[in-house]
């Protein structure tokens, strides 16, 4: 029994490979995210904005100035069966034309989706939701449900973001719009074509059922997918045990993530998620 593996791991490296800035639905600028990571003792950071690379340059420059190791990242929206899953890409070439074009396509769908979300909310008497949400979008090219949620909280429709999602922004609710994101095949093709590593994000947070998740793991493995977030700030602590088993079974590398969006909104701060079970191979062994 390796009694001090946990401390060994922790003292070896504090990696956080999933967080957001104002380039997508985070509350802090890319520079402020990196400064916070540094202040929290992070050694290796990836900024992983939704479907967007716009924050990477500022983040990298800030990380360099602080002596913090940084890898490129993005969180890709993927349609899987009848649900959405998120795939994090790490350490890719951000100039890869196929990857850049693929992300451009995913983002384009967000504008019409947002208009339709706003129309749905108008039908129950909440007018001007798109304009309101855009006030919260640091990047107008990347309008997300989070921006709608913040706006709806600000006008008193619900008491917090989580409540807005539950009552207005999930399937079956007035502000929800069915949307076709990218395919798993395309996303892994873009990430691998750009020399990157693919990670299944917060598997405990998806709405895909158990059979659908098993299919996802199998297909992801077949496509050369490398890793899974065993530890994520938006999963239950107990999920780590389950996804550690998945990592062992499929031979996936393990990732550790906060999925930090901002102070006051995210429960787990950057660099402060639980550590990985010591027998798993951390994905950062491929990154450093
Ligand atoms: P979108 O990509 O526009 O569908 O927005 C997805 C984002 O909404 C996620 O990345 C989270 O930041 C946020 N989100 C989704 N579900 C919830 C929830 N139940 N509570 C709080 N935030 C959520
Ligand atoms: Mn988000
Ligand atoms: Mn996500
Ligand atoms: Mn995320």
Image: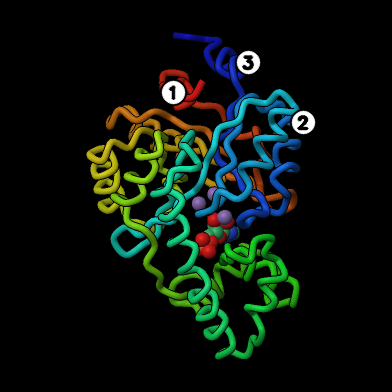
Relative to 191, residue 125 above or below: below
| Residue at mark 1 | 286
| Residue at mark 2 | 39
| Residue at mark 3 | 11
Q: Are marks 1 and 3 in contact (CB under 8 Å)?
A: no
Question: Residue drawn at (42%, 48%), measured in percent from left and top?
Answer: 97
Say which element carries label 1. Answer: helix
Residue 264 is situated, as x and y percent measured from the top left of the image, at 74, 52
Residue 235 is situated, as x and y percent measured from the top left of the image, at 51, 45
Label 3 CB less than 8 angstroms from ligand 4: no
Relative to 214, residue 284 above or below: above
Q: Are marks 2 and 1 in contact (CB under 8 Å)?
A: no
Ligand number 2: quarter of image: bottom right
Say which element carries label 2. Answer: helix
Q: CA distance from mark 3 to mark 2?
A: 16 Å
Label 1 CB less than 8 angstroms from ligand 4: no
């Amino acid at each position: 029994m390796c009694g001090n593996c946990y401390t060994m791991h922790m003292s070896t490296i504090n990696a956080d490979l999933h967080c957001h800035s104002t380039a997508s639905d985070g509350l802090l600028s890319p520079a402020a995210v990196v400064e916070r990571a540094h202040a929290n003792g992070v050694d290796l950071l990836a900024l992983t904005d939704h479907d967007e690379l716009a924050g990477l340059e500022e983040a990298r420059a800030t990380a360099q100035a602080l002596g913090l190791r940084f890898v490129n990242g993005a969180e890709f929206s993927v349609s899987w069966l009848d649900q959405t899953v998120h795939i994090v890409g790490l350490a890719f070439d951000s100039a890869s034309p196929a990857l850049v074009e693929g992300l451009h396509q995913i983002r384009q769908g967000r504008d019409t989706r947002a208009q339709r979300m706003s129309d749905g909310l108008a039908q129950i008497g909440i007018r001007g939701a798109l304009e309101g949400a855009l006030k919260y979008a640091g990047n107008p090219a990347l309008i997300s449900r989070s921006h709608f949620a913040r706006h709806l909280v600000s006008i008193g429709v619900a008491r917090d973001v989580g409540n807005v999602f539950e009552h207005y922004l999930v399937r079956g609710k007035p502000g929800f719009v069915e949307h076709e994101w990218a395919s798993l095949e395309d996303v892994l093709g873009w990430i691998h074509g750009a020399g990157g590593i693919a990670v299944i994000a917060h598997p405990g947070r998806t709405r895909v059922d158990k059979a659908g998740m098993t299919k996802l793991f199998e297909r992801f493995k077949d496509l050369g997918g490398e890793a899974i977030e065993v530890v994520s700030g938006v999963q239950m602590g107990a999920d780590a045990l389950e996804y550690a088993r998945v990592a062992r079974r499929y031979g996936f590398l393990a990732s550790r993530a906060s999925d930090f969006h901002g102070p006051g909104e995210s429960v787990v701060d950057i660099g402060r998620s639980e550590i990985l079970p010591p027998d798993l191979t951390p994905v950062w062994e491929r990154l450093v």
